[in-house]
């Protein structure tokens, strides 16, 4: 099988600065810093969940070397932590495997991030969920063809097949879909 070079790669303009996430958090205004530091206390649970999803084969890398799946944690209204691009092969990430997303602009197709790795190719999609659902605290993007087929067969909401991953079109589709979900239902 030929590897599709458009899969598993960042499609947005990555405006990334390398450094420690905590450094940027400490540089925020007091209210933002305190909220982000409080949310960062949930990091060990996020990383443990990501490891469990990796062990279950729901986050990882294909035999062709294409990474799939990612996880994020909202820190504040505008900041979220997300697993890094190209980290699918690693079983355990730790702090070195996550980026802090500072801003997404689907119209300009840009993502501003900070951290030891560049943000996931799906950062804009996670941003779309956080914008559409203010109560969302975590986004988990897994790959399971069997589960996806079962959910589609049961009529679960889904984005159009024409909306390619990592694009503004998918970001807009996810935002519209997430905004229509009933409270406490976050599967699509």
Image (cartoon, helix red, strand yellow):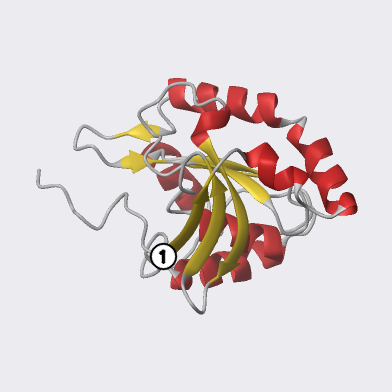
Identify the element where label 1 is drawn. loop
- Residue at figure coordinates x 74%, y 51% from the top left: 136
Q: Position of residue 68 (x, y in %)?
A: 38, 41
The number of discs equals 1
Nearer to the camera, 17 or 108:
17
Q: Residue furthest right?
A: 31
Q: Position of residue 81 (x, y in %)?
A: 62, 44
- Residue at figure coordinates x 63%, y 40% from the top left: 21
Residue picked out by circle 1: 12
**Quadrant assignment for the N terminus:** top left
Relative height, residue 139 to residue 112 (above, below): above
Q: Position of residue 46 (x, y in %)?
A: 64, 30
Q: Position of residue 145 (x, y in %)?
A: 37, 41
Around disc 1, counting alpha carbons within 10 Å, would you say few (fewer than 14), some (14 to 19), or many (20 or more)?
Answer: many
Left-right relation of 83 to 185: left
- Residue at figure coordinates x 60%, y 27% from the top left: 47
Name the quadrant containing residue 172.
bottom right
Relative height, residue 75 to residue 56 (above, below): below
Left-right relation of 121 to 124: left
């Amino acid at each position: 099988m030929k590897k599709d070079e458009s899969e598993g790669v960042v499609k947005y303009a990555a405006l990334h600065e390398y450094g420690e996430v905590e450094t940027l958090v400490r540089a925020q205004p007091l209210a933002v810093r305190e909220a982000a530091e409080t949310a960062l206390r949930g990091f060990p649970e996020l990383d443990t969940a990501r490891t469990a999803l990796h062990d279950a084969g729901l986050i990882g890398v294909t035999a062709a070397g294409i990474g799939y799946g990612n996880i994020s944690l909202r820190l504040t209204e505008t900041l979220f932590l997300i697993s890094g691009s190209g980290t699918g092969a690693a079983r355990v990430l730790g702090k070195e495997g996550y980026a802090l997303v500072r801003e997404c602009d689907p119209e300009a197709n840009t993502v501003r991030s900070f951290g030891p790795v560049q943000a996931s190719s799906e950062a804009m999609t996670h941003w779309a969920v956080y914008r559409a659902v203010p109560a969302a605290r975590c986004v988990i993007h897994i790959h399971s063809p069997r589960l996806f087929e079962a959910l589609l067969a049961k009529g679960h909401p889904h984005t159009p097949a024409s909306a390619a991953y990592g694009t503004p079109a998918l970001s807009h589709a996810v935002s519209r879909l997430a905004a229509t979900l009933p409270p406490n239902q976050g599967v699509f």
